Every structure is written in structure tokens, then in C-alpha cells.
Amino acid sequence: MIAPSDFYAALAEAGVTFMTGVPDSLLKEFCAYVDAELPPSQHVIAANEGAAVGIAAGFHLATGNLPVVYMQNSGLGNAVNPVLSLSDTAVYAIPMILVVGWRGEPGVKDEPQHVKQGAVTPAMLEAMGIPYRVLSGKADEAMDIAKWAASEATSTSGPVCILVRKGAFEKSTKKRLAATPAANMLAREAAIAKITGALPSDATVVATTGMISRELYEQRVAQDQDRSSDFLTVGSMGHASQIALGISIGKPEARVVCIDGDGAALMHMGSLAITGTNKGANILHVLLNNGVHDSVGGQPTVGFEASFTDVARACGYPVVEGPLVDEAEITEAVSRLAAMTGPRFLEVRVKPGSRADLGRPKETPAENKAIFVERLRG
Ligand SMILES: Cc1ncc(C[n+]2csc(CCOP(=O)(O)OP(=O)(O)O)c2C)c(N)n1
């Protein structure tokens, strides 16, 4: 395995002076190191992977230096437009190294949402004309691959990619200490239990990517509740609220609830304005804000620095409440807001972290979809 510090040192020696990206579970040790070691002038955690390509491009325009953009391969889709229409050699020819976590690599067991993306990742890179090498975790290859990537990006003046296999990195020796959560904050799973306990049984719930969906599933099992009301957005991070909006448009009488995360809401924040101004949308949008990308290693978001409630108000939600932390207030607000109509927004602040033994849904996405649509379409 490669020490994150060695890989960073190899990239720095090859000429990289700036990093930006969206965290990934396979890259979490590398992300932890970069986040702990680099000052804000050299590292920005971006809202989404396309935005990271934009930041990297701007940094290169300003300095002439070589940036790194890190991401999970799920984020390649977000990055395709700016990679092809901004940094490509046929447009502004901006050199950058994409460090991409290879979830769903063929032959490596992974969750259903990663299988197709993992299988097509090399072909996507080839179709985009992005040269790539695979970092498998042999300690001596970090330096060679970093050197190759830097010289290839510089000589072609375009993007190149280092595709990182599962298990390539060992534990980071450095990790930024997370801010101490307020003592009265609930764990996210406890907040989800309060929410499901307060929702009417006819509510339809769309949960965001990562542990929120997993904890919702586990809470339904623990409370012996019907799971056919829940759509688990296992992939397509940042789109849960728009799935909820589409459901609400297609089924106006449904009581739709979206349980979102701060990282996911930030990823496609423009969607808040589309939901908030849609007068016919019958959606309670609950944001569980823990200030981090908890599901992939706890790297910080700007969730506690920017105000989601101010954004939601400005985006037209007629009803906006929170941030709440108190469990009785959460229960009261959810049951009251669930009974209303129109777009409603509730921010709940929760502690980072999850149970070590948190499980995953036993059903496949296809099975989840089948029971969900049967109930929803009635
Ligand atoms: C497009 C895309 N980029 C990155 C990821 C990896 N990823 C999965 S969950 C997650 C973090 C979600 O953070 P947040 O919404 O704040 O929820 P939390 O995990 O903190 O509960 C990330 C970055 C992904 N699935 N898709």
C-alpha cells in the first residue's frame, strides 16, 4: 500500500501545487492527508466534481501551475462537461491530473450503483481522449505514476488521469480534527428515527446517497415499519430532492418527504430554487446537516458556514424552519410540517459519525423500485 504522504510528496515533486475535488471512500486516506496538511490556498473541497475542474482551471490560468482534481468515478459524469469543453486540448488546453477512485472495478465486489460505472470507467476515459494509468498500491509505483501524469499533462496541456484501485492507500498519519459537535446534537441515525416516527404512514420518502439511506433502511427494520414508502437514492448524489420533485409532479396528492445531506445539497444547490419556487410541489425537504461528507470519511463541507435556511428562503420555499437540534422540537416540526402542502424546508443539525455495524439494504435497487412503485402508483 502507498502512504498518502508519499503519494502527495510524489505529486508535489512532479510539480503539483494545488488540489481540489470531492471526497471519495477509496481516496479517503489521501483526502484526509491533503485536508490536514494543505492550507486553503492550496486545497479546496469543491461542491461537485465539475466545479472542481473549474477551480483547477482557474488556478492554472492564474499561476501556470499544475493542479490535481480528485474524485470518485461516480463524479466523472459531473466532470465530463468542463473536462471536454474547457480543459480539453481542443479548447483552452488546461493541464490537470484527475485522481479518480475506481469504485466497481470489474472483479472487485462493490455495491450495485458502482458496478456499471466501474465497468465503463476506462472506456469513458478512452472516449474522452484522457490518457490514464492505474495506481494499484505498490509503494514504488507512486513516484513513477505521479511523474508520468505530470509530464503527460504538461506536454499535452490537457487532462490526464490516475485511476486508483481499492485498497491502494494505507492509513493517513494526518487527519484534521473535526469540530466538536454541540453536546445536544443527535446522531444522524437517531434523528432519522425521530423523523420516521413523526411522519404519517402515507408519506413517501426519498433519501439521499450514503449513510442516510442506509440508516433509514435500518430504522425501518428496527421499528418494524413498511419500507415500500422509501426510495433509496443509492447513486446519483445530489439528486434526491429532484427525484422527490418529479414524484410530486407525477403524483400531486402524494405527501413527499426528501431526507437530504449537506454535501449532497451543496453538490447541486441550484435544485433548491427549482423546488422552492414550484408552487405545486408537495414536498417536505429535510436537510440533515452534519457539516461533513460523513459517508466517505468525514471530510468537511461548508454546511455550518453557509446558511441553508437563508438559501432555502431566498430560493422561494414558502416555509423554512431550523436549524433544529432538539429531539422534541424535531418531532414536533416534522409532524406539523408533514401535514402542510407546498414546498417546505427543515434543517436539522446532527453529529457526524455512524454505528460501526451499520448494514446495507438487503434488497437490490430493482426490488426496492418494484415495491416502491407498486405502493406509490397504487
Ligand atoms: C457524484 C458523486 N460524487 C461523490 C460521491 C461519493 N459520496 C457518496 S456519499 C458522499 C457524502 C455525502 O455527504 P452528505 O450529503 O453530507 O451526507 P453524510 O454522508 O454526511 O450523511 C460522497 C462524497 C458520489 N456517490 N457521487
Image (cartoon, rainbow, N blue to C red):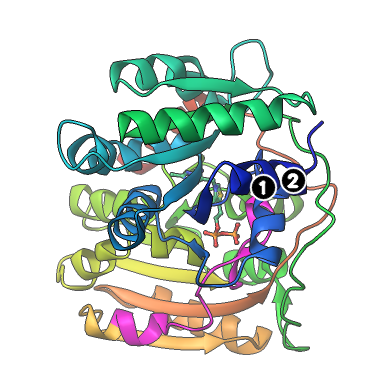
Dividing the picture into quarters, in which one does residue 191 lie? bottom right
Amino acid under disc 1? Tyr
- Look at the numbered disc 2 and give the secondary structure of its residue: helix
Is 190 on the left-hand or right-hand side of 91?
right
Res. 261 visible in picture: no
* Whole-number angstrom distance, CA of label 1 to CA of label 2: 6 Å
Is 68 on the left-hand or right-hand side of 51?
right
Res. 154 visible in picture: yes
Q: Is mark 1 within 8 Å of ligand 1?
A: no
Asked if residue 23 lies in the magenta stretch, the reply is no
Q: Please tell me whether residue 134 is drawn above or below residue 230 in the rendered image.
A: above
The quadrant the N terminus occupies is top right
Please give the range of residues in magenta.
290-312
Mark 1–mark 2 CB contact (< 8 Å): yes
Q: For residue 8, which numbered disc appears in the image?
A: 1
Question: What residue sits 52% from the left and 49% below the top?
Answer: 16
Q: Residues within 10 Å of mark 2 (few under 14, many from 20)?
A: many
User: Where does residue 39 sit, x and y in percent of width and height?
Assistant: 59, 72
Is 292 on the left-hand or right-hand side of 280?
right
Q: Please tell me whether residue 188 is drawn above or below residue 106 in the rendered image.
A: below
User: Where does residue 175 sit, x and y in percent of width and height?
Assistant: 77, 63
Question: What residue sits 45% from the left and 58% below the top?
Answer: 264
- Look at the numbered disc 1 and give the secondary structure of its residue: helix
Which of pointers 1 and 2 indicates the residue nearer the eye? 1
Determine which residue is flagged by label 2: 4
Asked if residue 302 lies in the magenta stretch, the reply is yes
User: Where does residue 256 sit, x and y in percent of width and height?
Assistant: 36, 59
Question: What residue sits 83% from the left and 46% below the top?
Answer: 171
Amino acid under disc 2? Pro
